[in-house]
Image (tube, coloured by chain):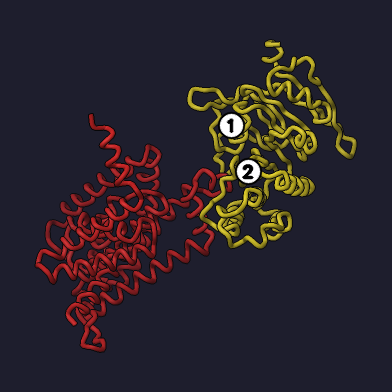
Chain colours: A yellow, B red
Amino acid sequence: MSVLLSIDNLNAHHGQLPAVRNVSLQVHQSDVLALVGANGAGKTTLLRTLAGAHRASSGTVRWDGVDITRLPAHQRVAEGLALVPEGRRLFAGMTVRENLLVARAAGRRGQWSFDTVLDAFPQLAPKLNARAGELSGGQQQAVAIGRALMTNPRVLLLDEVSLGLSPLAVQGVYDALRGVVGQGTTLVLVEQDLQRVQAVASRIVCMLEGSVVADAPANQLTRAQITAFYFGAQRPEAAPVSHTTGSADGEAANHASHVHPAHKEAA
Amino acid sequence: MNLLNQIVQGLLLGGYYALLACGLSFMFGVMRIINLAHGSLTVVAAYLLWVLAEPMGWHPLLALLAVVPAMALLGWLLHKLVLERSARLGALVPLLATFGLASVIDNVLFQHFGADTRSLATSIGTLAYNSWELPGGLYVGQLPTLVLVLAVLLLGGLHAMLAHTALGRQIRAASEDADTARLVGVRTGTVFAAASAITMVTVTLAGASLALRATFDPFSGPQQLIFAFEAVIIGGAGSLWGTLLGGVVLGVAQNLGAQVHPQGFLIAGHVTFLVILLARLYASGALRRFFSTRRRAAP
């Protein structure tokens, strides 16, 4: 599978404080990559840096082989990289219809349109003229994802989409995301619910204190291992070290699972 | 009957204030920037029209067609060169930058045109003083009525643009949350520059109204700014239809004040503005918080 997004030695700071440290990752087409880690691990900052909402201190982000590290956020959207931010960040004073249409005008042309987004999130159809700020949490999350889909992304970055939602609403959101993946969209999601992560992700990346400490196919990490990485208690040697995946036509592509060198040393 | 006449005349004057204030309100509503050069830019538009209509002999309407795009371009440049850069440095910097810009504009106009007062009233023939008679012996000036209609059309047009066009949605999105707007692909810099250009179109129409119905000089800007600011505050900052209401309330208050005392025209407007401002601060609890903070801070 081709590499869509390639991150090389990426660093990002909040003031003087390092939030992302020497992160190197590759996101392949049709990946469902889950970023897990404790609060403050740097997941949100990494997603925001990829989306262009946060400035990278050093390192490179390549999109289809082209360096986009300094590209503004709106141009990344035009290239097909969209972020559903933590907390939804809807335009609360605008209606659901307007929230969706504002993204259509600015995004790429493709399979996602106003009608197909409503097909994916039918609960929004009766709420089109309601102000986004008046909706329930689940409905707001549906608008946030639908708004990002209106830009026709090739890679959709999702930050804590289940945060603050009822279990039923979370189920609804993930059912819709399965449909999004089915349309060929690549997902990079930050999620705290490890059970759900293991159910939906094809690949899991664990972060600790701004660094990647594990990167492996979802089916090669046990929940206990993820939890251990989550808290920094896992001995890195115990993590899977490599695996190979192949596309349907048999062409193999190597997704090397790894443990970050810094953590090998620490261990 | 005299009272009714004063109210009607105040309503017509309010149309001009609404036209004048609409750009200030739009810029504040969209970009949260209070443009202290607003009045001076209105006078710039009036001078541009005057130059084309008087020394060069153009018809005022033709001059307006030429000045509108020129001022729109000036608005675009104003945003890119002054407002965008100063807004990055905090909320206070655009205030200082536009205050300085107003000072520069006023003095450049003075240096170039001198202290003489100008008007375009002579360029539009009898329209400058013709009136319509209403039932009951009331007379309404044709030009003030046209200005009021223009103000309503302009505010309605801006409202429709914001509500129903792609640019309007992008302006509202960028105004509500610029960071998130960029994340859905909105070019916020371009959108705000377009909003500044639209603001300058309204400024040009206000400048044309000023030039046609009154006199102006290089230092008329600050007074126009005060009237615009009062109308915006009375009507509710950032609200377009509120701006129309604010303009009308200010115009009526000034006309009624003039009936009480010759100096009452300006004083009544300022008092109305202050009373409404204090009432808004009291209703929002800001006054109580201010005084309780002072009491706590006292030794």
Circle 1 SS class: helix
Q: B278 left or right of A163?
A: left
Q: In this view, does A265 lie to the left or right of B188?
A: right
Letter of the chain that mark 1 sits on in the rendering: A
Q: Earlier in the sequence, mark 1 or mark 2?
A: 1
Q: Are marks 1 and 2 in contact (CB under 8 Å)?
A: no
Residue type marked 2: Val
What distance separates the C-alpha of mark 1 from that of mark 2?
13 Å
Q: Which residue is drawn at 75% across and 25% down?
A: A226
Badge 1 is on which residue? Answer: A45
Chain letter of the residue carrying label 2: A
Disc 2 marks which residue?
A84
Residue A222 placement (x, y as % from top left): 81, 26
**Residue depicted at 34% across the width and 48% down the height:** B285
Image coordinates of residue B118 in percent, x first then y, are 16, 65
Residue B62: which quarter of the image? Answer: bottom left
